Amino acid sequence: MTRKKYSLLLVDDELANLQKLRRTFMEQYSVHSAQSAAEALEILGRVAVDAIITDQRMPDMTGLELLETLQKSHPNLVRIVLTGFAEVSDLIAAINTGKVHKYITKPWEPDDLRLVVHDALEKMELIIENERLAAELKLANERLRTENIILRQEVEQQVFSKSIIHGSPEMENILHLLRRVTGTGTTVLIQGETGTGKELIARFIHGESNRRDQIFIPVNCGAIPRELVESEFFGHSRGAFTGATQEKKGFFEMADGGTLFLDEIGEAPPELQVKLLRVIQEGEIMPVGYNQPRKVDVRIIASTNRDLKAEVQANRFRQDLFFRINVFSVTIPPLRERRKDIPPLAEFFLQQFSRKLNRRTGGFSDETRELMLEYSWPGNVRELQNEVERLVLLSEPGRAIGPELLSDHIRQRHRSSPVSDGDLKTAVRELEEEMIRETLTRFGQNRSRTARALGISRQSLLEKLRRMGIND
Ligand SMILES: Nc1ncnc2c1ncn2[C@@H]1O[C@H](COP(=O)(O)OP(=O)(O)OP(=O)(O)O)[C@@H](O)[C@H]1O
Ligand SMILES: [Mg+2]
């Protein structure tokens, strides 16, 4: 046990008794004394005290009453009562309910009293220590649970989609290009529309690097509340702010030695952008509540589905940060610009979902294949993946998957021209609705960005959506 100097508060209305008590403890303890309960309370409000020894009989308040008040306000205070032998029976109830830890009958021997106080303090320290350990254990368990979730996602991801399926020269080129940086610690920026496989590529880069046995942590930069950004990314000390009851590691420290995937970096709020710039420049972080920076060794892979250069020009993204992350950048083309990837991807997903959903299908019919090849896939690979899952669910066991099972908008792509017949107004409206639907899918249903891409106001987009029967 620690040998810190404990502090005692002695309470007795008789001065002679107080002096005797003082002499008993003066050497080993730092001693405060009070001649009444009121004075004792006043001292307790000012100084930290480890144990209180009080006389039972005092004019303003009995020792027991005093200790009873303290049980609530100072739960970790060791509470000892000095009492005449005849009154011991009155104390039993108080001891049983924890109001009093020990009682000592008068007259007392200094050595006995010292021993009693010492034991009581030691016992209290063990209790406090146990509580702290239990809290730490609880926290450690929570940490483990979080890590376990991350690891499980990792494993699932690897089992589910180990490789980057492709059949197009465009994708082949990208993979070829990427192999040049996988083995290095170079920062990589991956650009591409939603669902093109940016995260998959990021995992691929990590998996091919010499960090592959270390952790890969994906973080969505736009999804963390502003007020938590600093502590989530850089961690904090215990007591750094209200509610910071334990020290916490931030993403950068958790990813030390591994890879941090800054997903949707274009959505990072300005405060985060400044801080990211600093870490990337200095290679060190400053957790909240500390004043010593810590070195971290983290490989950064960033992704965005916005045009980051344009974001810089529009003053929404810091240019200096852009330069730092734009060291080696790849742009994954949308699926409609690498159509040769569609057939192998469709077959791959078909196998995956057949296995997962336990459905044996008869494969795609020729016409289904053709329609899938021609469709524009604004939601890219993810949309294709979802469509195939849907097809597998709808399919009859052993029967070929015909075009009638495809979603309406994919099947309808085939009609020759939107303005073939009917009046112009209807045709224009049809075209408009189609473009809106596609753009919405492309921007993950984000209204503002869809409006911007279509060159109309958000208000006018919302009106059109209401007309189309699409509400939030
Ligand atoms: N080439 C590919 N081979 C196999 N699966 C792929 C391929 N490309 C994408 N996928 C799958 O498509 C889905 C979407 O990919 P991912 O999440 O990597 O896209 P993203 O570009 O990060 O999308 P978002 O911008 O919406 O976050 C995932 O389930 C991924 O495994
Ligand atoms: Mg993603």
Image (spheres, rainbow, N blue to C red):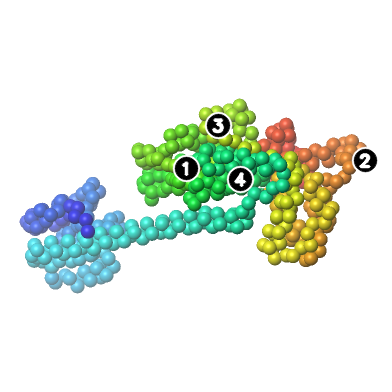
* Residue 461 visible somewhere in the drawing: yes
Q: Which residue in the protein does label 1 denote? A: 298
Q: Secondary structure at mark 4?
A: helix
At x 43%, y 34%, the residue is: 282
Q: Amino acid at mark 3?
A: Phe
Dot 2 or dot 4, earlier in sequence:
4
* Label 4 to label 1: alpha-carbon separation: 18 Å
Q: CA distance from mark 4 to mark 3?
A: 20 Å
Q: Residue under circle 4?
A: 201
- Secondary structure type for disc 1: loop
User: What numbered label is drawn on residue 421?
Assistant: 2
Q: Residues within 10 Å of mark 3 (few under 14, many from 20)?
A: some
Which residue does the numbered mark 3 point to in the structure image?
Answer: 322
Labels 3 and 1: the sequence-earlier one: 1
The response on whether ligand 1 sits within 8 Å of label 4 is yes
Q: Is mark 1 within 8 Å of ligand 2?
A: no
Residue 57 seen anywhere in this rendered image of the structure: no
> Tag 2: Cα neighbours inside 10 Å, few (<14), some, or many (≥20)?
few
Q: Quadrant of residue 8?
A: bottom left
Sequence-earlier tag: 4 or 1: 4
Residue 375, picture quadrant:
top right
| Viewer-proximal residue among 54 and 412 | 412
Q: Secondary structure at mark 3?
A: helix
Amino acid under label 2?
Asp
